[in-house]
Amino acid sequence: MDDLIDRSQQEKRDKRDKRKRERDLSDIKKLAEMPEFRRFGYRVLSMCGNYQDAYIPGDPHATSYSCGRKSIGLWVMGEFMIAKPELIIQMQREHNSEVRSAQNEEE
């Protein structure tokens, strides 16, 4: 009998967790429609060091710190990719376009 109760409770938890996960991904998809969010997301990924090596030669503490930052960045990137696979590329293109535009203004 306890096994049936445990299974029933587990099924309820699983359904609740699935609904929460679907909501989380839906939130990202909705936010991804906003250029402001995409710019912010790109800055977060950049600040986390996703696009650079976390190893700091001769400084294990700085390396550990960099690995922690990168870990968060990789999680965020993973969430973006699950919710909307093209989001990362879209953010990179928009960022590159802004950089080119700023360079053209300086010339």
Image: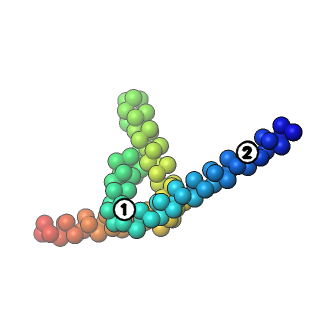
Question: Picture coordinates of residue 14 (x, y %)?
Answer: 68, 50
Q: Is residue 98 above or below residue 1?
A: below
Question: Picture coordinates of residue 24 (x, y %)?
Answer: 52, 56
Residue closest to the eye, 102 or 20: 20
Q: Is residue 13 above or below residue 22?
A: above
The reply to whether residue 58 is visible in this rendering is no
Give the residue displayed 51% in from the left and 65% down from the top: 85
Outermost residue toward the left? 107
Q: Is residue 2 above or below residue 25?
A: above
Q: Looking at numbered disc 2 in the image, what kind of residue is underneath it?
A: Gln
Judged from the image, the secondary structure of the residue bearing numbered disc 1 is helix
The reply to whether residue 22 is visible in this rendering is yes
Q: Which residue is mark 1?
A: 38
Quadrant of the drawing holding the C terminus: bottom left
Judged from the image, the secondary structure of the residue bearing numbered disc 2 is helix
Distance CA(mark 1)–CA(mark 2): 37 Å
Q: Residues within 10 Å of mark 1 (few under 14, many from 20)?
A: many
Residue closest to the eye, 37 or 72: 37
Give the residue displayed 31% in from the left and 66% down from the top: 96
Indicate the colouring scheme. Answer: rainbow
Q: Earlier in the sequence, mark 1 or mark 2?
A: 2
Quadrant of the drawing holding the N terminus: top right
Q: Looking at numbered disc 1 in the image, what kind of residue is underneath it?
A: Arg
Q: Residues within 10 Å of mark 2 (few under 14, many from 20)?
A: few
> Which of the labelled discs sits on residue 5, or is there none?
none
Question: Picture coordinates of residue 94 (x, y %)?
Answer: 33, 67
Question: Picture coordinates of residue 106 (x, y %)?
Answer: 13, 66
Residue closest to the eye, 20 or 44: 20
Q: Which residue is mark 2?
A: 10
Give the residue displayed 73% in from the left and 45% down from the top: 10
Asked where in the image residue 59 lies, by quadrant, the reply is top left
In this rendering, position of residue 32 left or right of residue 20: left
